[in-house]
Every structure is written in C-alpha cells, then in structure tokens.
Amino acid sequence: MKESPKFEDIVGKIERASDEAPERKEGAVSFSEKWASPEEGTEELYALWRDYQRKRSDLAKDYREKRAEPKNEKESPADRARRIRATVAADTKLAPLRTAISSRFKDDQVRSMFENTLERELAEEEKLAPSYDNYLREKQLKDGSEERRLELYSDIFSHREKEADELTLLELADLATRVRVSERSMQRMEREDPELSARLSFERLRTYREQLKKDGFIWTPSREKLFDKILEHLVIVNQNRPLLLYGETGTGKTRLARAVSQRLTDRAPFEVGEEAKTDIRPLLGLRSIDKDKETFVTYGPLGQAVTGKKTSRDAQAGPGGIFYMDEMNGYPPEGLRSLIKQLSGRRAGEEISFAAWAGNSEKLAPEFGFIGSANLPSEKHPDRAELPVEVARELGSLEVDYPPQSAENPELYEMMLAALMDQNERIRVPKSELPPEWKEVVDARTNTKHYEIDADPKAGGTLWRFAEFVAAVQKSYKGEENALTDTLRDASYLRHAVLDPGLVISWLQEYRKSAMRTHESLKGFLATKIGEWGSQKIYPEEDRNLLKKFQEAFQL
C-alpha cells in the first residue's frame, strides 16, 4: 500500500513542506512545535497539513483575482500557473505552518504513526470504493430529485397568484416517488454493509458540521420531515392561513422558522420585537409626515412581508417574504384576532388594507407567508396563555418536538458529534469518551447471541451519556417517564428547567475551540457546564435538586 500513488503523493508533499520550513535559531522553540504525545502530534500534523493546503489554495486564488497584473500576452497559461505557484510558495504567511509541520514530521514516532494511519485509511477507502460509488450514484439521483423539487416549490411559492399547472404537479408527484425509491435503495445498501454504514455516518456528520457552520442549523431527518410539512402548508395548500408551530420550550421552533425562510426564499424572515406585545399596530406600519407635511405609511416588518414595500410611496413592490411571530399567545388578544382574520385565506395579488395604513391598500405579495409559534397551556403548564378561539381556528398547526435520542435513532448524539468535529473533519476527543457501550444479549428462545446498546445511564462514553442525560431532562420537563421515574415517581418531573439543544451545541463548540486545547477532559468540562446551568436561581429549588440527581444518574 505504501507504494500507492496517493500515499506517495501525500507524504511527498508533506515532506517538501517540511523541507521548506525556515531554519530556526538554536534553542528557540515556539508554541507550535510542542505536543503532548505521539498520538496528539499525529492528529495535529494531519490538521496542520489540511490548513496548509487550504492556505496555499486561498493564496493562489488571491494572486489570480485580487492581485491580478496586466495580462502578459507572451506568457502562456502554463507559465502563468507556474509563476503563481512559485509566488505562493515564497509567501511568508506559509512559514509558521511549515515550521509546525516540519517539527512533527521530523519526529520519528509522529511520522511513523501518521504514515501507518494514512496507510490504513487509504486501504479502507480503496476496499470500500465499489460499494461507496454505488451508494453515491443513488445519492446523486436522490439529491437531484430533491433539488428539482425545491426549485419547483420555490417557483410555485413565488407565483401563488395563480394555480400550479397540471404538468408541474405531475412532476412533483414523480419526484416524490423518485426520492422514496432512492431512499429505500440507500437504506438497504447501508443496512447490508457495516463498513459502508460507518463511512456514511462520517459523511452525515461532515454534512451536519457544514450546515452548523454556515447557517447555525442542522437539517437532521426530524427537521427535514417538518420542512416537508411546512412546504405542504405554504405551497401546496396555499390558502395563506397562518401556520402555528407549537411545542415545549427549547424545541427549536424559532430556529426552524428562520431556516425554512432561508431555504425557501433565500432570505431571512421578517420578525417582530418584544415591543409589539403591547401594541400590534406598528407591525403593520405607522403614518409618517415628510417635510412638505404630506403623509405616507412606513411599513413595519409584517407590512413589508405583506406588501413587498418599505413605504406606501415605493413604486415597485418586491416579493414580500415569510413573517415570523414568536410566542403568539403573548400578544393582545383583540389586536391578534383582528390581524389574523384580515390575513387568513387571502390570495397573492389580492387587495388588502388595514386601519394602520390610513386608507391605503396594497396587493398581497406573492411570497408572503405567516409562521407563528407558541408554548401552549397543558396539564403540566396550565399557567400559559391560551390563544383566542377565533384565532386558533384560523391557524394551521404543526407540533415541533425535541430531536429524538435513542439507541435506534440517536439524532441528538449525532448533532453533538458534528459540533465536536473540527474544520479538518476530525473529532479530537479520546474515542473512549464518545460512543455508547454495547452488551451481549442471548435470545433464550433461539439460544442465539446478538449485541445491543446498554441502556444503563452509567454505560457508554461521556458524550453518549450526555446525549442521554439531555434527552432524560427533556422528557422530565415534558412530564414523560424518564431515567428517574421508577425510583422518584412524581418527583421525577422538572417544572421549569430544560436544556435547549442549541445551548448544548454551543457548549460542545466551546469545548472544541478552547477547553479541549488545554487538555481539559470532556467529562470535566460538561460537569462544570451542567453544574453552572442547573444551579441558577431562576429555577425552583426542587428543579435544582432534581437536576443534580440526573447528573449523578448519568455520572456527569
């Protein structure tokens, strides 16, 4: 394997980068030339090499575009490329990276471990290539169908003043079938090939990491299903009935609404501030007077989403957009009732007017959509405000739950792994701190053995136990059976404290960016974070005490 062109190419390039490192003064050792163990040095060498490749690529692009010289007609494209490569190679910005790479690559233990790891990974990649290529072909078909489906949905959404034609609806139905067929085929391939399944798990985490970095939101399977239902309401049903996202505190309703708007319209939603909870009229607009004492309307966020204009004087209307209203049940009932009745059922292009517009009327913008959210009253939370009956019956509704976390569907755990993955696609946490623990189970009927994830709260690595801890806290808050129900009965339910997945992800990102670099263990870091969060005085004493019991149960 070491004679393979790919192996020789990678090692050769690292060797050249190492040889190009500037000579350092005798006795001078920088922070970039220190590592705690061969394992750590190997991980850092891989990361530094990836950084070095990115930096060279960015510099080459910079020289081609931003520092472009007058075109030399006598210089061939090949000569220009060689000159740019030489210029990039001489750039002093690469020197610190070369020094860090060189110090590790010239250490016999680090180099040997790096080459052995690289050799093993390339061999696994080569072995997996045929089945992975088949999977990728099927995935490309699925991705193409989904991309075309979203394109059609966006086009229908942008032209909602008219019905979608029959051909478009037939194509959407065909695309939905194609996606289902591809998904079944991909699931079968993953189920039948454990090595392929492991590779695909890594690819999924890489995709999640890219989404988290780009948008701060991860499109996990449960969120994709919610997106499909929201699309159906906004695009296919197309009655402009406001859609209510309801669910417990911290399920991610606001993040979902923002991500849906960005994905469907390529723009953030129009949102409302807290001030509207005392007076709803500024959402629509306010009368303004110019220097000539002529009046016009300056539209508020809802007015802009409805009209596609900033003021009533704008000659051209834009497409409008999604309007998002958080905690709908916190607004003045009379104003909310009037607003929803005015908007519900309106068609794109239809004339609409509000009292706040001082007699002005506008056409409803084609991309207007109304999404609201609320934490509704329940047996456990009877103190929450009800939505007025007249408002509730005008709304479509969709429940948003916490991301699932179980042995069969560890979605939350995968989100956590993605938060720990660095820009070089490595999770630099000891493997013993990450996975669940498997146990051997004997089927008494057939006398056969199989393995399953140990459900004991104390079993598994730190990250798995943390995912299970978060899920147990969320179940407790919802009033569902959890890890402590058998022993504490009714005392196992939290009243006010619950962990938002967004907060949990931010903790893990903080660990990856800072605490991990100081060699603090993941367990120690999470124990501190949970303790600080769970001891806040905003939570009643019963909740604070119960959180300590959850923390003890999961050994965090």
Image (spheres, helix red, strand yellow):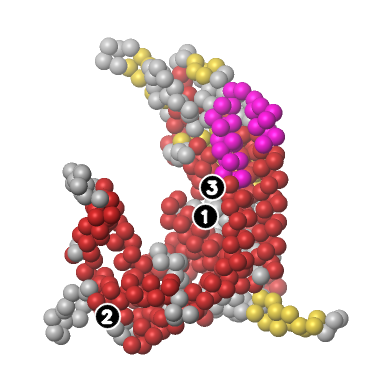
Could you say whether the residue bearing mark 1 is in a helix, strand or loop?
A: loop
State how far apart marks 1 and 3 are (Cα). 9 Å
Between 513 and 17, the one nearer to me in the picture: 17
Please tell me in which quadrant of the rendered image residue 177 appears.
top right
Q: Earlier in the sequence, mark 1 or mark 3?
A: 1
Q: Amino acid at mark 3?
A: Leu
The residue singled out by tag 2 in the image is 103
* Nearer to us: label 1 or label 3: 1
Q: Position of residue 93 (x, y in %)?
A: 21, 63
Marked residue nearer the N-terminal end (2 or 1): 2
Give the residue at the far left of this rendering: 25
- Local packing at callout 1 (Cα closer than 10 Å; few below 14, some 14-19, many 20+) is many
Identity, as a three-letter code, of the amino acid under mark 2: Ser
Q: What residue appears at the point 33 percent right and 64 percent down from the top-left corner?
A: 53
- The residue that disc 1 covers is 218
Magenta part of the chain: 145-171
Q: Position of residue 24 (x, y in %)?
A: 16, 79
Q: Is residue 106 left or right of residue 535?
A: left
Q: Nearer the viewer, residue 341 or 448?
A: 448
Residue 101 visible in the displayed image: no
Q: Report the magenta stretch's main SS.
A: helix
Write the residue at 46% across / 57% down: 210
Give the number of the disc on residue 256. Answer: 3
